Image (spheres, rainbow, N blue to C red):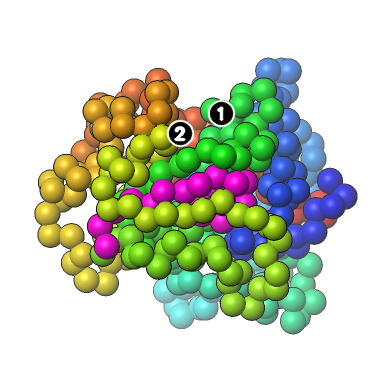
Amino acid sequence: MSSWSHRHILDLSTFSLEDFNIVLELANRFKALPKTGTRKLPALQGRLITTLFFEPSTRTRSSFELAAKRLSADVQSFSPNSSSISKGETPIDTALTYIGMGADVLVVRHSSTNVPRQLVQYLEANGSEAAILNAGDGLHSHPSQGLLDLYTLARFFNPKEPLTESIKGKKVVIVGDILHSRVARSNLWALTACGASVALCGPPTLVPQEFEDFVKAPPPGQGQDPIKKRGTITVFRSLKDACKNADAVITLRLQKERMQENLLTDLEQYHNEYGITHENLKWCNKSAPVLHPGPVNRGIELSSALLEDASKCLVSEQVSNGIPIRMSLLYLLATH
Ligand code: CP
């Protein structure tokens, strides 16, 4: 683990293949722990993990908190509705308050893109040792979700050795509201790093053609791309065309809360064209599974019958894998 170099985790565009494999290998070890009779490790005893969620969450917040407890860390939660945010306190002042109480890692979710980055800049300028772990910022990035999706796919393709090599050459379809999805952006950096070819599918209002160039250059302000040769991204309008020869499908929630204008007029028509069901999953390669980061709009992006079919749908597996992935991230940030 000596080659781990990230002080904070804001985005997967900065991850090398080695970084991905460090996280996946560690997650695999944590995932295997219950089989050895061990549920809890003393690894982060005495460390303080603070979850600062300025935006709602069920899965991410709970699994970060459980991951921290499984590593014996102390956990502090913050809830904006019962906090001094209502008195005008800013996110940075809120974070500084928790750092003043000794937080080693702040897990931050905010509806505004780049709030976690602004926190990093502020903390580094002021010599703070605390680490920031982005738990989802606006449309920008959701790195722990991108990593747990990668791990879930790697385990599906190669249960014995679920590392980046397991993803190489696979075709993964991402269907739905790519435009408003920080999960899709993190999936794109992770999957193309591992050499997958990604088919993006949806109407032009939700999947602009420019997404084909998304990983062609690192984000502004970032140096060289740490990945020498990334997989490709291709945009499809027809689900049947996108699914041809596909090895897996990731479908995404329609994020109505982030839509500035009404981009969809007919949800039934959307489901008919882009909703994933048992019938259209058959357009993919045999045994291709469907994933969804949750929360799901049942009957819109995914049929209820498919959501409840664990032989085809990996949603429960994703939720379960979120814990070892988040244990890995907290361990790496709190101990390096
Ligand atoms: N996938 C995800 O981020 O879910 P939550 O909003 O419930 O955390």
Q: Are marks 1 and 2 in contact (CB under 8 Å)?
A: yes
Q: Is residue 250 above or below residue 135?
A: above
Q: Is residue 103 visible?
A: no
Residue 330 is a magenta residue: no
Q: Is residue 310 above or below residue 184?
A: above
Neighbor class of circle 2 (other Cα within 10 Å; few <14, some 14-19, many 20+) is many
- Residues in magenta, as a range: 187-204
Q: How far apart are the two marked residues, 1 and 2, measured between alpha carbons? A: 9 Å
Q: Is residue 209 visible?
A: yes
Point 65% across, 55% down: residue: 229
Left or right: where 273 falls relative to 255: left
Residue mark closest to the camera, 1 vs 2: 2
Q: Position of residue 246 (x, y in %)?
A: 42, 36
Mark 1 or mark 2: whose residue is earlier in sequence: 1
Quadrant in the picture for residue 217:
bottom right
Point 84% across, 46% down: residue: 1
Q: Which residue is mark 2?
A: 247
Residue 194 is a magenta residue: yes
Quadrant in the picture for residue 13:
bottom right
Q: Is residue 49 above or below residue 324?
A: below
Which of 232 and 11 lies nearest the eye of the viewer?
A: 232
Q: Which residue is mark 1?
A: 157
| Mark 2: secondary structure | loop
Q: Position of residue 164 (x, y in %)?
A: 66, 40
Mark 1 belongs to which amino acid? Phe
Quadrant in the picture for residue 244:
top left
Quadrant location of the C terminus in the rendered image:
bottom right
| Mark 1: secondary structure | helix
Mark 2 belongs to which amino acid? Asp
Q: Position of residue 32 (x, y in %)?
A: 69, 24
Point 35% across, 39% down: residue: 243
